[in-house]
Image (cartoon, grey):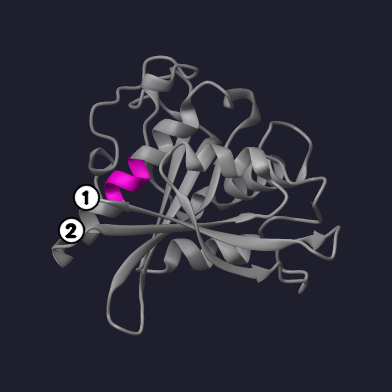
Amino acid sequence: MNENNINQGHTKTDRFDKESVFLREATLDDISALEKLLNCCYRETAGWTNEADLIGGIRTTSAELAAVINDPNHYYFVYPKTITGNRDGEETGEILGCIAVDIKTDADSNKKAYIGMFAVHPILQGQGVGNVILQAAETFADRHLQSQNQPSRLTMSILSHRPELLAYYERRGYKLNGNKMPFPNDGNNGEPKREDLELLELEKMVG
């Protein structure tokens, strides 16, 4: 897929300028950098999006990331750091942001897009980079689902006890839909630090 499909109108000129953010599809070569970014953003204390007070352990593994990248229904996009700060510049190997769009089909053959594995490097948080990445993913998902000739349904899950994160997504049009489940205590995505931790589902209709 051409990266312009998900990032029309943005040219990389300054790595800290939100208007310069560009995305390309992730490859297996990105796994190490993605694992580092996700575990940093979710499990360490840097940045405002971390879950360190609620969950210990790791956020993801190289095997999980490889499965996502190889899944034909899963589109994983990354914002790579380059030496020059331009989209055409040589990449340094570091990933500054990422987001995944998983196209799912329900029992009635209706499709929806699940947005997950969303992260922005702590040094860039609070500068609008996440807004650009999320909007690009939403645009991509809407275009992918438009063939249904009906509004596109976007969903995501967030942890309970994160009112600031819920408020962030509500400002961007997402709403709780009442679906929730206990946080899985299977060791695959970290270890919950409180027994009442849940995953809450949000959804947004676009198009």
Of residues 148 and 25, the one drawn nearer to the viewer in this rendering: 148
Q: Residues within 10 Å of mark 2 (few under 14, many from 20)?
A: few
To which quarter of the image does residue 147 belong?
bottom left
For label 1, the residue is 207
Q: Is residue 175 magenta?
A: no
At a point 68% along the width and 33% down the height, the residue shown is 48
Tell us which disc is closer to us: 2 or 1. Answer: 1
Could you tell me which secondary element the residue under label 2 belongs to?
A: helix
176 versus 97 height, above or below: below
For label 1, count other residues whose C-alpha is less than 10 Å away and answer few (under 14), some (14-19) or many (20+).
few
Check contact, mark 2 vs mark 1: CB within 8 A. Answer: yes
Tell me residue 51's x, y (percent): 74, 46
Pinpoint residue 142: horizontal percent, then vertical percent. Answer: 26, 52
In magenta, the rendered stretch is 136-140
Q: Which residue is mark 2?
A: 146
Q: Which amino acid is tagged 1?
A: Gly
